[in-house]
């Protein structure tokens, strides 16, 4: 297993964010091109907690960066979390659905309804496996409102609930980003820019540093 930044062979280990950065041993036979990270006390925020359920909790976790996918397992210990993550990896390799094959959809079904993904990623409707790069902008019906080119660059929802897509060329650029590049943006303005970039109407990526578990059907 290799570190994704240094390329150094780090053996079968789980990179952990503990104070001394000591890795944990990986117990499962992961492929060499899978990078693992985890910890014993990860803070998790629930997107839509059920009635009487806490808005957050702590747990041991292990995350696996697999080619074309991202997997996460949780449990009382790092070993338990790795086993959960490994089980997800096995489902990715061998769908337990009725045909044994994944049936990919550009989003997932939650208790609140279908949650579409607009970046080409999708979920298997049988086992909920995740994979990126499954759908093109054309297949998703996403075309720039200005020039008509297929795009996954930017979208926003108008007051009528209609999604509006824009390509990179026709997405208005916040002039404060130029100030940021020149090092002239003060702290309060930087906070405003980062808040705007993180708005829910812009899902440029599905992975975040803080895990937010989703609703299950």
Image: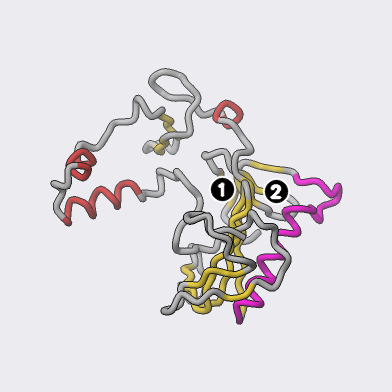
Which residue is found at the position 66% from the left and 42% from the top? 105
Separation of marks 1 and 2 at Cα, in angstroms:
13 Å
Q: What SS does tag 1 mark?
A: strand
Q: Is residue 54 left or right of residue 193?
A: right
Of residues 153 and 19, the one drawn nearer to the viewer in this rendering: 19
Tell me, for residue 124, which label it has, or none. Answer: 2
Quadrant into which the C terminus falls: bottom right
Over which residues does the magenta segment extend?
A: 77-102
- For disc 1, the neighbor class at 10 Å (few under 14, some 14 to 19, many from 20) is few
Residue 211 appears anywhere in the view = yes
Closer to us: mark 1 or mark 2? 2
Q: Relative to 48, does residue 66 appear above or below in the rendering?
A: above
Which residue is found at the position 62% from the left and 44% from the top? 122
Q: Relative to 128, does residue 135 appear above or below in the rendering?
A: above
Q: Name the residue under label 1.
A: 115
Residue 57 appears anywhere in the view = no
Q: Which residue lies furthest to the top in this view?
A: 147
Q: Is residue 121 left or right of residue 198?
A: right
Which residue is found at the position 41% from the left and 49% from the top? 200
- Mark 1 or 2, nearer chain start: 1
Of residues 137 and 18, the one drawn nearer to the viewer in this rendering: 18
Magenta residue check for 44 = no
Q: Is residue 182 left or right of residue 14?
A: left
Rendered location of residue 5, percent (x, y): 47, 54
Q: Which residue lies furthest to the right in this view?
A: 99
Rendered location of residue 130, percent (x, y): 64, 51
Magenta residue check for 89 = yes
């Amino acid at each position: 297993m290799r570190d994704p930044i240094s390329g150094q062979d780090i053996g079968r280990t789980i990179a952990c964010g503990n104070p001394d950065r000591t890795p944990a041993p990986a117990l499962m036979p992961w492929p060499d091109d899978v990078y693992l990270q985890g910890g014993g006390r990860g803070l998790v925020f629930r997107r839509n907690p059920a009635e009487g359920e806490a808005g957050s909790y702590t747990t041991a976790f292990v995350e696996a960066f697999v080619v074309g996918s991202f997997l996460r397992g949780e449990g009382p210990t790092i070993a338990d979390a790795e086993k959960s993550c490994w089980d997800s990896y096995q489902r990715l390799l061998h769908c337990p659905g009725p045909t044994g094959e994944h049936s990919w959809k550009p989003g997932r079904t939650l208790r609140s309804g279908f949650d579409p993904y607009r970046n080409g990623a999708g979920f298997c409707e049988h086992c909920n496996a995740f994979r990126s790069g499954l759908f093109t902008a054309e297949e998703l019906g996403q075309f720039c409102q200005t020039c008509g080119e297929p795009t996954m660059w930017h979208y926003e929802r108008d007051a009528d609930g209609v999604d509006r897509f824009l390509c990179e060329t026709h997405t208005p650029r916040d002039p404060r980003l130029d100030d940021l590049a020149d090092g002239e943006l003060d702290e309060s303005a930087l906070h405003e820019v980062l808040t705007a970039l993180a708005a829910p109407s812009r899902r440029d990526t599905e992975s975040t540093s803080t895990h937010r578990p989703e609703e299950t059907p």
